[in-house]
Amino acid sequence: MAHTLVIVESPAKAKTIGKFLGRNFLIKSSMGHVRDLPKSQFGVDVEHGFEPRYITIRGKGAIVKDLREAAQKCQRILLATDPDREGEAIAWHLSHLLELPQGPVRIEFNEITRNAVQEAIKKPREIDQNRVDAQQARRVLDRLVGYRLSPLLWRKVRKGLSAGRVQSVAVRLIVDREREIEAFEPEEYWSLTAWLLSGDDGEAFPAKLYKYAGEEPEIKNEDQMRAVLASLEGAAYTVTQIKRRERRKNPAPPFTTSTLQQEASRKLNFTARRTMQVAQQLYEGIDLGGSEGPVGLITYIRTDSTRIAAVAQLEARDFLMERFGPEYVPEGLRQFKARSDIQDAHEAIRPTSIWREPESLKNVLTRDQFRLYNLIWERFVASQMQAAVMDTTTVDISAGPCLFRASGSVIKFPGYLRVYQEGSDGEGREQEQRLPELSEGEVLRLQSLEPKQHFTQPPPRYTEATLVKTMEELGIGRPSTYAPTIETILERGYVIREQKQFIPTELGRVVVDLLKEHFPDIIDVEFTAHMEQQLDEIEAGKLPWRQVVAEFYGPFSRVLERAEKEIAAIELPEEVSEEKCELCGRNLVVKTGRFGKFLACPGFPECRFTKPLLETIGVTCPKCGGEIVARRTKKGRRFYGCQNYPECDYVSWEKPAGRDCPHCGTRMVEKSSRHGVRLICPNKECAYEEMVQEAR
DNA sequence: CAGTGAGCGAGCTTCCGCTTGACTT
């Protein structure tokens, strides 16, 4: 029988550690937090030192029971939850639930390697109460803010709304950006490109107007451009200066959660949620057909660190040496500079073995899994490779009062670029641009002058990628919350997503304005940063957590009271649809009822006409050829029916596909499972099905 | 599985952060 129980947070981690520790150890997982403030009550006694009331999280009872039973059977218990603030708190809650005596029960390791785990086991320590208290302060503060502000919004704006330290700032970013865009006034400007030739043959190369009469050219309109063109009449284009230099370009660091979500959005068009779902599959393990069962292909996926375990770096060097040769291996181990404000509980996201090349897994991975694994693998490999070296040339060409500049860039040594190039948010990407051999004093032949009109562009709307990036930079939210936060602000109707961009709704604007007016501190991007400073003080034992919370709550509750009195209930404008009332001809408006949105006549109660709000899915009905629309049951469950109901009664729980079963002719439906999306024939006797995702 | 919005008024909504799974209707 095992004599030491080790508790970690994730079952996949438990499995890996089990391999390192042998028979005397029993490894169990807590599946994250097991105790928390109650969801349906306030749970904080503000009258008595903000005493939190913790209960076992709904659904986690069986886990707690299992851990208790395991604890009974073992002589020693080690709490190996993650080495960060939340992990310390989980350990503390576990020690209470398992009624552990005070003592050295806590161990930490921040990489899952044999050596790190075995070393950690030798050095147990007591639970760090200061760190636990910092977590309690964070937790209670978030509860106070969320559960006081949200009800205010129910009363003043609309029931069911929410506000919080993280989500409200995210909405604010999107609203502020939209207003910048609306206020933006485009300004006209012109550019001039000369296409030039050296010698008799070869292709023309472009040179941009760089200076005019020694100054930065400012060409605001067509007239000014004409004047510039006139000044070039009959001018000779002479090469005045050639500068060559070598530029080194280093690879991007391996992925964190945030950068993985950004890059998967840019390169694979994945949402943050989809990225995390697929990454979770890769982390939990894929059955590769070997005898050992599922194999975890990547390290832990919720991390803010770019740190890499030394063993993995050494393995990467071996790999690079063999696959690419010594010139692709940097001299020393590559270190990426880390931000100071990260928690660094886990390594960066990397393949668990660099030798498992994506191509070799094509047949066992789904298309999504393959593409994401490929991205992670390439990014990691590149991160350990030698820098790329570019030869850049800058050529100045004078013509009349104008100075043109051409630049060329040639890859001298590709280095990491052989494997991976980072995506960008803009449209243009740096490309290799060649220039012909030129010499100073050479006179070039002008092929053409290309004047072009431009307008300054407003700042771009946020996408998932840029929003996650910004939130991370501001320290708002954590790796485990970026994707859920995005879903929350969409669900509440504060923003919508169009193409890949976030656009605030009227509701989003109203709520942000209300919060800005009365709670400017909380909705400020600095709020979290300030909170983190306070938490650091608590962690250092310099401040008691209750005092930190009290200093926030005093002013906050006074502002709450005033806001409750001062704010009048806000009328949100009705959304007017294009559709007309069939009884009186007025434009129908969108109403929200018990079962969600529907269209109603604005003449209520004189005219009581209503009709369902139809959401088409671009598929026609197999019975009558009408449009299929998505609807909801009384219980809120989504289903699909024909727009011609009740004349046509076609209906389906699953989303109908655009074609029929090749065997029995019944309309196929889409069904998604963990392995991807399948088309299924709903006719039970037929049961034909096919994978919609391309194989691999 | 095809409802609906006033009024009445009970009972409900809501935060952030840690982790995975699921009544195949």
Image (spheres, helix red, strand yellow):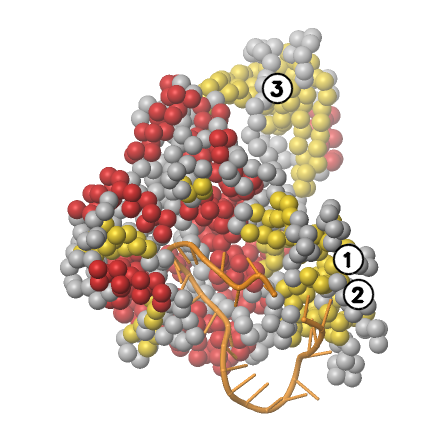
Q: Residue A312 placed where, x, y %?
A: 33, 34
Of callouts 1 and 3, the N-terminal one = 3
Q: Amino acid at mark 3?
A: Ser
Q: Amino acid at mark 1?
A: Cys
Query: Label 3 neighbourhood size at 10 Å, few (<14), some (14-19), many (20+)?
Result: many
Residue at numbered disc 3 = A398
Q: Amino acid at mark 2?
A: Cys
For mark 2, name the chain: A
Of callouts 2 and 1, the N-terminal one = 1
Tally of numbered tags: 3
Residue at numbered disc 1 = A621
Question: Between marks 2 and 1, how big is the CA–CA gap?
Answer: 9 Å
Q: In percent of the image, x 70 and y 68: which residue is there?
A: A575
- Asked whether the beta carbons under mark 2 and mark 1 sit within 8 Å of each other, the answer is yes
Are the numbered discs 2 and 1 placed on the same chain, yes or no? yes
Are the numbered discs 3 and 2 placed on the same chain, yes or no? yes
- Asked whether the beta carbons under mark 3 and mark 2 sit within 8 Å of each other, the answer is no
Residue at numbered disc 2 = A648
Question: Between marks 3 and 2, how big is the CA–CA gap?
Answer: 75 Å
